[in-house]
Image: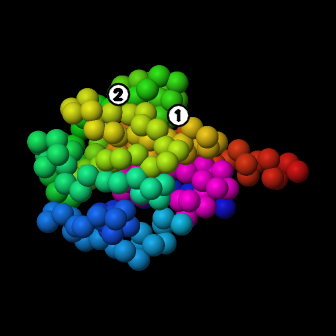
């Protein structure tokens, strides 16, 4: 295994971070959480490149002891992070990235146009994670990384639908590095 992607999907079950479900938390998959949380922890322990996409970023945070905002409109006062349920239509917004961060390096810029579709987000950061990207709409955390890891990045948006998926390309390059080293040995 050269790397791990934690993909988007259903809401993370609030019981995995010690909370009661919000009335809008729906479609949780506790069995998926129970499988993916240890995978995320083990990937970080083994220093494998790790990319968390949307739910995957939230799961990275929960795996390291963080918590989530279960329904952003209640917290930020708007629904701009998920304008159309089940669609990326009109789902664009910019994310401001910290200079020198892995997120900025992966995107190749400090302000990145994103496609997002979520109603949950990071609340309290998990141990060892730092926030390195924030929505220009409301400063919601939209990128996290583990600076002590070789390559561990969580993004709240969906880089797989970016017209030029720089984050995915950076992740693939990071995943290829250890494989190339093992083949040469």
Residue drawn at x 55%, y 64% as measured from the top left: 39
What is the count of numbered marks? 2
The mark found on residue 102 in the picture is: 1
Residue 114 screen position, x and y as percent = 32, 38
Q: Is 154 displayed left or right of 49 in the figure?
A: left
Measure how far apart labels 2 and 1 are at the Cα level: 13 Å
In the picture, the disc for residue 123 is none
Span shown in magenta:
39-59
Disc 2 target residue: 96
Q: Nearer the viewer, residue 170 or 44?
A: 44
The outermost residue toward the front is: 18
Residue 130 locus on image (x, y percent): 46, 38
Direction bottom: furthest residue = 31
Residue 178 vertical placement versus 62 (above, below): above
Is residue 157 found inside the magenta-colored segment of the image?
A: no
Task: Specify the quadrant of the image occupied by residue 174.
Answer: top right
> Is residue 50 inside the magenta stretch?
yes
Classify residue 57 as left or right of residue 117: right
Percent from the top left, x then y, of residue 50? 55, 51
At 14% across and 48% down in the image, what residue appears? 73
Is the N terminus in the top left, top right, bottom left or bottom right quadrant? bottom right
Query: Is 77 placed left or right of 183 in the picture?
Result: left
**Circle 1: element type:** helix
Q: Earlier in the sequence, mark 2 or mark 1?
A: 2
Mark 2 lies on a secondary structure that is strand
Q: Is residue 34 visible?
A: yes
Q: Residue at x 49, y 43 (%)?
A: 129
């Amino acid at each position: 295994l050269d790397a791990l992607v934690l993909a988007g999907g259903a809401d993370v079950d609030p019981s995995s971070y010690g909370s009661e479900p919000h009335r809008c938390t729906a479609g949780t998959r506790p069995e998926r959480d129970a499988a993916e949380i240890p995978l995320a922890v083990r990937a970080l322990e083994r220093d494998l490149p790790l990319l968390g996409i949307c739910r995957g970023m939230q799961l990275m945070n929960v795996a390291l002891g963080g918590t989530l905002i279960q329904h952003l409109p209640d917290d930020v006062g708007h629904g701009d992070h998920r304008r159309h349920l089940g669609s990326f239509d009109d789902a664009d917004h910019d994310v401001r990235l910290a200079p020198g961060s892995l997120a900025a390096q992966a995107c190749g810029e400090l302000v990145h146009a994103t496609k997002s579709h979520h109603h949950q987000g990071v609340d309290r950061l998990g141990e060892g994670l730092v926030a390195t990207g924030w929505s220009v709409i409301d400063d919601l955390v939209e990128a996290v990384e583990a600076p002590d890891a070789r390559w561990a990045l969580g993004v709240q948006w969906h880089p797989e639908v970016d017209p030029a998926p720089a984050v995915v390309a950076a992740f693939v390059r990071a995943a290829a590095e250890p494989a190339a080293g093992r083949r040469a040995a």
